Image: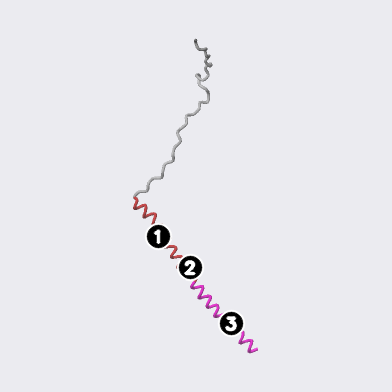
């Protein structure tokens, strides 16, 4: 029984050591994530500033190109005009 208690105590000590190691590893991982987030924030801010700097250097940005307008079509009359309703011309044979 004393042997069993000693084995259990060793197991408990190992578990405590493993738990401390995991807690330390987790704390390091959290610090690495925070550092990565800060670095990403700096990079995003730096990239976001570049277009603004380019616009300032170039002056006022050029207006966007205007779309090409199609020529306006004349509306087709709903009814044919009186000239269009005139009788067809009679063709005369050519004089010889």
- Relative to 18, 40 lies left or right: left
Does 96 sit above or below residue 4? above
Q: Earlier in the sequence, mark 1 or mark 3?
A: 3
Circle 2 — which element? Answer: helix
Does 32 sit above or below residue 94? below
- Relative to 49, 93 lies left or right: right
Disc number placed over residue 12 in the picture, else none: 3
Residue 27: image x %, image y %? 49, 73
Q: Which residue is mark 2?
A: 33
Circle 1 — which element? Answer: helix
Tell me how far mark 3 sits from mark 2, CA to CA. Answer: 31 Å
Instruction: Name the main secondary structure of what is drawn in magenta.
Output: helix
Q: Which residue is mark 1?
A: 46
Residue 8 is a magenta residue: yes
Disc 2 crowd rating (10 Å Cα; few below 14, some 14-19, many 20+) is few
Disc 3 crowd rating (10 Å Cα; few below 14, some 14-19, many 20+) is few
- Relative to 60, 7 lies left or right: right
| The N terminus: image quadrant | bottom right
Residue at the extreme top: 96
């Amino acid at each position: 029984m004393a042997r069993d208690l000693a084995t259990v105590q060793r197991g408990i000590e190992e578990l405590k050591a493993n738990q401390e190691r995991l807690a330390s590893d987790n704390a390091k991982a959290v610090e690495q994530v925070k550092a990565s987030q800060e670095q990403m924030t700096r990079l995003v801010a730096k990239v976001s500033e570049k277009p603004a700097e380019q616009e300032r250097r170039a002056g006022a940005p050029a207006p966007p190109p205007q779309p090409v307008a199609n020529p306006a079509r004349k509306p087709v009359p709903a009814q044919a005009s009186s000239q269009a309703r005139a009788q067809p011309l009679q063709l005369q044979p050519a004089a010889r």
